Amino acid sequence: MTDVSEWLKVESLDLEAQGVAHNSEGKVVFIEGALPGEEVQVSVGRKKNNWEQAALVAMRRESSQRVRPVCPHFGLHAGACGGCKMQHLHPGAQVAVKQRVLEDNLWHLGKVKAESLLRPIEGPATGYRYRARLSVRYVPKKGHVLVGFHERKSRYIADMQVCKVLPPQVSDMLMPLRALVGSMDARDRLPQIELAIGDSNGVQVIALVLRHLEPLSAGDVAKLRAFAAEYGVQWWLQPKGPETVHLLDEGGPELAYTLPEFGVVMPFKPTDFTQVNHHINTVLVGRALRLLGVQPQERVIDWFCGLGNFTLPLATQAREVLGIEGSEALVQRSRENAQRNGLSHKASFVARNLFEMTPQLLAADGVADRWLIDPPREGAFALSKALADLVQDPSLAPGWTPPKRIVYVSCNPATLARDAGLLVNVAGYRCVGAGAVNMFPHTAHVESIAVFTR
């Protein structure tokens, strides 16, 4: 075991933003709060045969990239907020770390090396989070309510007064929300408040979804309405699952986001999946479409299309776009968004279980010149394997041809690397570029984009 007197040199960061070092015995040591290049002493809290997990106790060489955290609730101490893990590292260095994580995953998991590194997509490091799920808990012993993210490595809610990654107007609302919930009859039966921010004709719309385990009293409803009037928010209520979400009062401004480059407006519900960082999403969509290089006469398939985040912009450029998603309800919403934007004649949608894709099902969706793939964290293994199988054995679908170019947007570098291994090493594609997308500054989450061609 690492002795507390031993000085360790931190070599890198892992996906949990822990410093990685080796002790004198060659064993890997993961160190909370340590940064690459630093020399530290640690206290081991957990040990296995091949690794140890430790806490930083002393430092004699500090990284030039270490900075003062922007949020007073960030830290390694008990009670610190666990929403961010990298505020002690300069935002530019965070992007460099995520780019290296992407490269390492592509090589070590997929045996793929991108021919070029794409310039990282980055933006504001604070005030960016337009979606969040805030836990709520009434603490009778303390006589007050907590609203915020969980403490680091704990089920308890951090005692947050501000949050620097939320927009300032939402951060300023945390304490009033605590007071509101504390004054309600149902204060001990309100487990969460979900945040979603959109815009309506250039005006920001803040939606708050209140999860309530029992029907609200007339007095509680009146308090919600008074809060909405004072702080300019929409209250949505969620008595059960996400499908039960509804506006407390109809007639308010529409919740939507825009993609100005393509003239597209995307209405959504506050519990729908949309990117948390609208600035980065706007840049990402434009970058992805430029990398895809769609021509007016071409047909494109958008796999895992969601509400049409990429499908509708693609429909402004291609002859035809097919959006495919796993839920019939979501597909119907995509159709409505296409109609809303006057793109129904070019964008069509179908529901398909993309985690059970076969070569036959893939061929049935027809030949497309280009693909855009934007899967959840599980990746697109079945889709990639079906494509590889068809390339290896064209007799499975005579006349079908693979796309000549694929842009893959990923929220998990490990599953991207796995799928890239199939595309490159089996299906014969080249990975011509890959780059990090800093969708979640100050967190260890790595979003990325990769381009494949054949």
Image: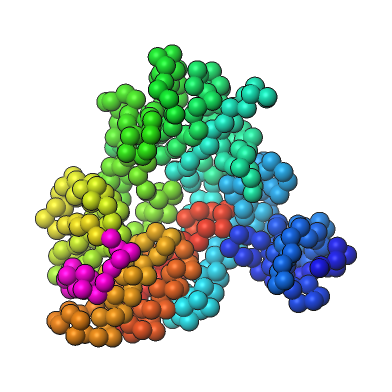
State the residue at coordinates (29%, 80%): 389
Which residues make up the magenta segment? 353-370
| Quadrant position of the N terminus in the picture | bottom right
| Quadrant position of the C terminus in the picture | bottom left
Q: Position of residue 122 (x, y in %)?
A: 48, 58
Q: From this viewpoint, which residue is outermost toward the right?
A: 5
Location of residue 380 (image quadrant): bottom left
Q: Position of residue 433 (x, y in %)?
A: 41, 75
Q: Position of residue 353 (x, y in %)?
A: 28, 60
The answer to whether one can see residue 45 in this image is: yes
Location of residue 234 (image quadrant): top left
In-image side of 220 versus 399 (left or right): right
State the residue at coordinates (58%, 66%): 97
In-image side of 106 versus 359 (left or right): right
Is residue 364 covered in magenta? yes
Above or below 268: residue 227: above
